Image (tube, rainbow, N blue to C red):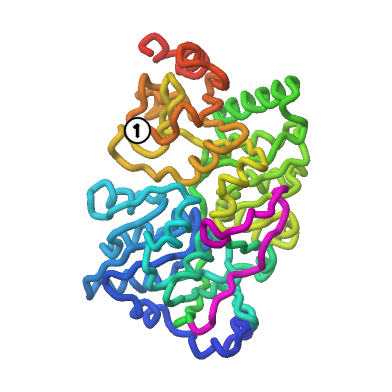
């Protein structure tokens, strides 16, 4: 056995369970409920799903797939297009599976990301026949060390009847130690989650499992799919500047200090670009407490702006993957990856007093936000963690460009076609046109403010 594999496979009794991806894929049966690791195209199973795609060429079978969030193309494109996925939850972001969902070929359970672990505990999701988890290593004492995400892997591993490990040796060994695996107990019996600072560690370095549950170990060298964010443009830079000026006004009003408050930034290009705007600002010693760490967070760490960043996954562009994972020792003491029921936990979001920045598809003149459905009927990606954060944050901020489709559509409408975040959960709206601070305002006060400050000039008169 390869020396690297031997080193990563600390429990030598598990060496006999190393098999090919085809052998592991053959363990799954038609109708199985499968929990897969992965959160925003990071730390997801890759080689076993592709073996399932090959198997589907000669055999008709379907499985229900639950994950942390969106996965790479192996599952959310190829496995979906092969007709293997019957039901999918709780989040996706690939055109392949999105088309299958909107065509009615895949049932989709869109859900708040903090809720899924509770649904597993209650048996609403399950029984889980197999958990397929990507690992950087398995320790001698039986800890599965995740790779670039934690997501729902701990709860899947706990409740699954069987576990398949994808031991991915392409990930750096220096990932070992950045995870903090803390799993709450059953509702009604659990203790208070003892976190008062974003950089606190609560649990263990890996996911402890009974080795007997591990039925197969497959060696992988497949890297994470790069994130699909686009670089900041002039309009996103304008939005960042507007938001920075807003924070300055909050400091002047005595509601914030120069270190602000722990920051959460949602998945996507706009939120990432807005966060990038902090690099040239006077703000410093920032903490990030989020669900995903994108390129901007590591740019801010390199710029000396962010002292510590906590999330459920690391999702990077190809360029940043090389820079970060090739030099993980530089970042390791500034990072922590947690289960998503901790990263997105309402109790912690409220206690830590987060500034939450998420992206809207459209919003209306009262402050309601649609973040999931195009024209009210076609699913885009899902609500993800935005609801977890917006409802419980100190400041719930939504950003979007004021228009879509090259200006053919206004992102500000009289009434949203689908409501994900009600006006009660939306504090601040930012577009490239300006900002609307909705806190403490009645509906009649909100309407003119949103139209005047946030709508594109081409649509103000109609609104």
- Helix, strand or loop at disc 1? loop
> Residue 123 magenta-drawn?
no
In the picture as drawn, the residue positioned furthest to the top comes out as 461
Quarter holding the C terminus is top left
Residue shown at 69% from the left, 55% from the top: 335
- Establish if 455 lies above or below 85: above
Boundaries of the magenta span? 184-212
* Tally of marks: 1
Q: Nearer the viewer, residue 219 or 428?
A: 428
Task: Work out whether residue 435 can be spotted.
Answer: no
Of residues 230 and 11, the one nearer the viewer is 11
Could you tell me if residue 142 is visible in this image? Answer: yes
Q: Quadrant location of residue 20?
A: bottom left
Left or right, 21 with reference to 98: right
The quarter holding residue 50 reads bottom left
Q: Is residue 245 left or right of residue 17?
A: right
Question: For the point 32% across and 70% down, which residue is it?
Answer: 32
Quadrant location, the N terminus: bottom right
Q: Residue at x 66, y 67 (%)?
A: 204
Q: Position of residue 269 (x, y in %)?
A: 52, 40
Residue 188: x, y in percent?
A: 53, 56
Q: Which residue is mark 1?
A: 418
Determine whether 291 is above or below 242 in the image: below
In the displayed structure, would residue 58 be above or below residue 198? below
Q: Quadrant of residue 418?
A: top left
Residue 195 magenta-highlighted: yes
Q: Which residue is rendered at x = 64% and y = 81% of the image?
A: 141
Percent of width and height locating residue 425: 50, 31
Prevalent SS, magenta region: loop
Q: Position of residue 442 (x, y in %)?
A: 50, 15
Give the class, few, some or many, for how many residues have Cα within 10 Å of label 1's Cα (few <14, many ≥20): some
């Amino acid at each position: 056995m390869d020396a690297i594999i031997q080193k990563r496979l600390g429990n030598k009794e598990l060496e006999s369970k190393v098999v090919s991806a085809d052998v592991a894929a053959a363990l799954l049966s038609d109708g199985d409920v499968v929990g897969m690791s992965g959160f925003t195209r990071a730390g997801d199973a890759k080689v076993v799903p592709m073996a399932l795609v090959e198997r589907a060429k000669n055999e008709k079978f379907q499985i229900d797939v639950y994950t942390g969030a969106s996965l790479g193309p192996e599952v959310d494109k190829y496995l979906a297009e092969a007709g293997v996925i019957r039901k999918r939850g709780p989040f996706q972001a690939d055109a392949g599976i999105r088309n299958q969902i909107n065509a009615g070929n895949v049932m989709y359970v869109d859900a708040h990301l903090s809720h899924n672990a509770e649904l597993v505990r209650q048996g609403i999701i399950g029984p889980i026949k197999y958990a397929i988890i990507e690992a950087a290593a398995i320790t001698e004492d039986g800890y599965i060390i995740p790779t670039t995400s934690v997501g729902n892997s701990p709860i899947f591993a706990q409740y699954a009847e069987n576990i398949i490990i994808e031991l991915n040796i392409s990930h750096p060994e220096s990932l070992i130690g950045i995870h903090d695996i803390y799993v709450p107990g059953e509702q009604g019996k659990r203790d208070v989650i003892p976190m008062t600072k974003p950089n606190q560690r609560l649990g263990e370095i890996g996911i402890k499992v009974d080795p007997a549950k591990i039925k197969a170990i497959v060696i992988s060298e497949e890297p994470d799919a790069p994130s699909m964010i686009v670089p900041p443009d002039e309009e996103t830079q304008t939005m960042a500047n507007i938001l920075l000026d807003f924070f300055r006004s909050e400091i002047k009003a005595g509601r914030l200090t120069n270190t602000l408050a722990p920051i959460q930034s949602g998945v996507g290009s706009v939120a990432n670009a807005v966060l990038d705007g902090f690099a040239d600002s006077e703000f410093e010693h920032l903490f990030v407490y989020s669900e995903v760490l994108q390129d901007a967070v590591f740019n801010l760490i390199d710029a000396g702006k962010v002292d510590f960043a906590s999330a459920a996954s690391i999702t990077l562009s190809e360029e940043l993957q090389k820079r970060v994972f090739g030099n993980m020792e530089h970042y390791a003491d500034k990072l922590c990856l947690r289960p998503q029921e901790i990263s997105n936990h309402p109790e912690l979001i409220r206690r830590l007093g987060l500034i939450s920045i998420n992206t809207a598809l459209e919003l209306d003149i009262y402050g309601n936000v649609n973040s999931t459905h195009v024209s009210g009927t076609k699913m885009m990606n899902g609500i993800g963690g935005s609801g977890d954060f917006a409802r419980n944050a100190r400041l719930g901020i939504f950003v979007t460009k004021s228009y879509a489709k090259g200006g053919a559509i206004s992102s500000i409408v009289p009434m949203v076609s689908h409501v994900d975040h009600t006006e009660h959960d939306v504090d601040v709206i930012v577009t490239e046109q300006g900002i609307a601070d909705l806190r403490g305002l009645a509906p009649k006060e909100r309407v003119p403010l949103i139209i005047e400050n946030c709508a594109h000039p081409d649509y103000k008169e109609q609104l």
